[in-house]
Amino acid sequence: MPSRLKVLFAAAVLALAVIVGSVALLWKGSPTAMVGEALVGGPFAMTDQNGNRVTEKDFLGRYMLVFFGFTYCPDVCPTELQVMTAALADMGEDGKSIQPVFVSVDPERDTAANVKSYVENFGGGLIGLTGSPEDVATMAKAYRVYYQKNDGPSGNDYTIDHSSIIYLMGPDGKFRKHFTYTTDAKALAEELRQAIGG
Ligand code: NI
């Protein structure tokens, strides 16, 4: 299937997962709520931009705004990370309760050192996570993120198709809300304010 179709298909699968999750959340207290909450997110073990191993437990207690991509991404990733950090800055004090996180889907090229210089471009306390191919696959699977390497003309010259969805996780580590690709930082800030009740 052409890569564009695969991205659309992955988006459709995620949308379905979120719909099922949302419906399940309407039935809070019933066993189905557990199923819904479990659909996006879960355990992971990654390496942060400083070379430290971290897991989902290190992020408990604060909201987490998560975006998956790769540092060589020409367009979508830099735009979206810029929009995320701009939205959090726009939120002022409320924004400080949300930790922005970039997760690499390019473990081959995205070393911790590369990720460090990349996240520093965006400021806003953005944390970058990378790891072994297995680490990345496990976290991407937990978040229902699709990614697919497209070989280029030479070995190290390739791109990666990937989902461009932003996830808001709660201080309890559970999925709260997702946002599709946007270039409107003010609108994202407003939606985040509503989501965290700020
Ligand atoms: Ni990208």
Image (tube, rainbow, N blue to C red):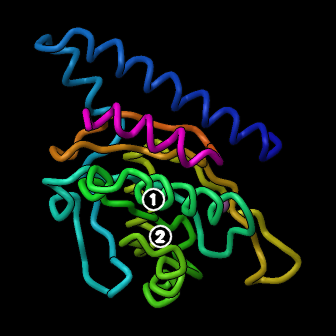
Name of the residue lying farthest toward the bottom = 113
Q: Are marks 1 and 2 in contact (CB under 8 Å)?
A: yes
Q: Quadrant of the rendered structure where residue 51 is?
A: bottom left
Please say whether residue 196 is one of the residues in the magenta stretch.
Answer: yes
The stretch in magenta equals 183-198
Q: Residues within 10 Å of mark 2 (few under 14, many from 20)?
A: few
Q: Find disc 1 in the rendering and name its residue.
A: 137
* Percent x, y of residue 99: 31, 60
- Residue shown at the point (78%, 69%) measured from the top left: 151
Secondary element type, mark 1: helix
Q: Quadrant of residue 59?
A: bottom left
Q: Residues within 10 Å of mark 1 (few under 14, many from 20)?
A: some
Q: SS of the residue at dot 2?
A: helix
In magenta segment, residue 11: no
Judged from the image, the quadrant occupied by ligand 1 is bottom right
Image coordinates for residue 194, horizontal then vertical, percent: 34, 31
